[in-house]
Structures are given as structure tokens and as C-alpha cells.
Image (cartoon, rainbow, N blue to C red):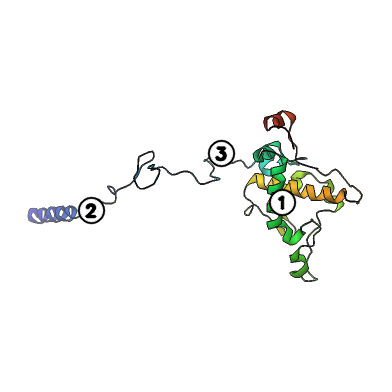
Amino acid sequence: MRYTLGLMILSGSALLSGCHIDMWEQPKMKAYYESDFYSDRQASRAMPEGTIARGKLRTDDAYTTGKEGTKLVARIPAEAVKSFGGPKAMLDRGEQHYTVYCSPCHGTTGNGNGFIAQRGLGFWQKLPSTLLQPRLLKVEDGHIYDVLTHGKGAMYGYASRIQDYNDRWAVVAYVRALQLAKTTSGATPVGKPTPTPTIPATEANELGGAH
């Protein structure tokens, strides 16, 4: 019995002596250490653009949802306008995203006659809405933001495609600009479309004045 026990101990020792400890003693870089692997000699890497710290995701305020509780916000939040430095830059950004994501269906002018409506839909399929209709001239800015984010009817949501909240509001601003262009080009104005995204006077002063 003792002989057998001793043999087992010796065998176990032999096996353990042949094990490698590479897995827990492998070369690695710890946070804030210096490294000669990267050109900036820093082991810690910069966070990718758009990274959100744990616990800091905003999903329940007017800026991120277009709603205050269950009520749609009437106007584009000032925070979104400030993020672009002013209304002009915001409209330019909105035009870029509208052209890429919205114009194929809704058309470059918002009349609902984009090239998909012209060539890709059969007579039995629902045509895209015109953004210039009286009903949409009267809705809140938050309504357009909400539909853009979550979709409505045959239109799917664009939250996964336009992930930046500011860019979504920029599209809202550009849609309002298209509506304003229509109502001031000879058509009878209906409702009160937003001419340009606005910010409070105190915040406008910080940006060098509103545009």
C-alpha cells in the first residue's frame, strides 16, 4: 500500500514538473504601462469614437428619444444644435444623411418620389409618404425624430444606420428646411415648420451668435 502511494506521488510530481506556466506568465501589457509595440509607447489604447462608459448611456430623455415622458418635443433640442457649432453646420450634416438614407424613397425634395418609388415598387406596394403633406408640417420635431429612429408603417427604423443622436436631429432639421422651402415657393403655408434649428440666446452667444 505504501509502495503504491509513493509511486502515485512520484508520478504526480513528474507530471506536474512537465506542466508549462505560459498561460499565466505570458508576456502582456497592463493599463498605463509603457510599451515599445505601439508608436506612442503607451500600452493603453484610445477608446474608439462613440464609446459610451458603462452606466452613461442615455435612453430616456428628450435629446435621445424625442420625447419628454410620453409627450413628443416640439422643437429640436438645443444640445443637438450646439454639437455642430451652429445651425448651418447642422443643416449641412442633415443634408448629407438625408441624401444617403432618405432620398432613395422620399426624393431629394421630400415629395415621396425617390428612385426606389419610381423603379423598385409595384402598383400593389405602398408608396413612400411625401414629407411635404400638410399633416407632417404640423407635427412636432420629436415626431419626425421618433419615426426616423423606430420606423412607422412600411418604413423600418434607422437607429442602426444613423446611430448618432445628433445626426438624427440634423436629418429632422433638414426635413424642416425642405418643408419650409416648399411652403415659401408659392404653395400655401400650412402649420409652422421650423425654418432653422434654434438655440437660446445665451448659448448662441457662446457660439459666436446664431446663424
The image position of residue 119, as x and y in percent, is 75, 70
For marks 1 and 3, give the CA distance. Answer: 29 Å
Name the residue nearer the viewer: 152 or 14. Answer: 152
> Which structural element holds mark 3?
loop
> Which structural element holds mark 1?
helix
The image position of residue 156, as x and y in percent, is 69, 58
Crowd band around label 2 with a 10 angstrom C-alpha radius: few (<14), some (14–19), many (20+)? few
The residue identified by callout 3 is 56
The residue identified by callout 2 is 20
Task: Tell me if 54 is positioned left or right of 130 in this view.
Answer: left
The residue identified by callout 1 is 95
Task: Tell me if 142 is positioned left or right of 193 in this view.
Answer: left
Which quadrant of the figure has residue 10?
Answer: bottom left
Task: Tell me if 131 is positioned left or right of 6 in this view.
Answer: right
Crowd band around label 3 with a 10 angstrom C-alpha radius: few (<14), some (14–19), many (20+)? few
Hey, which residue is sitting farthest left in the picture?
Answer: 3
In the image, what residue occupies the spot 54% across and 46% down? 49
Considering only vertical position in the picture, is 126 above or below 92?
A: below
The image position of residue 18, as x and y in percent, is 18, 55
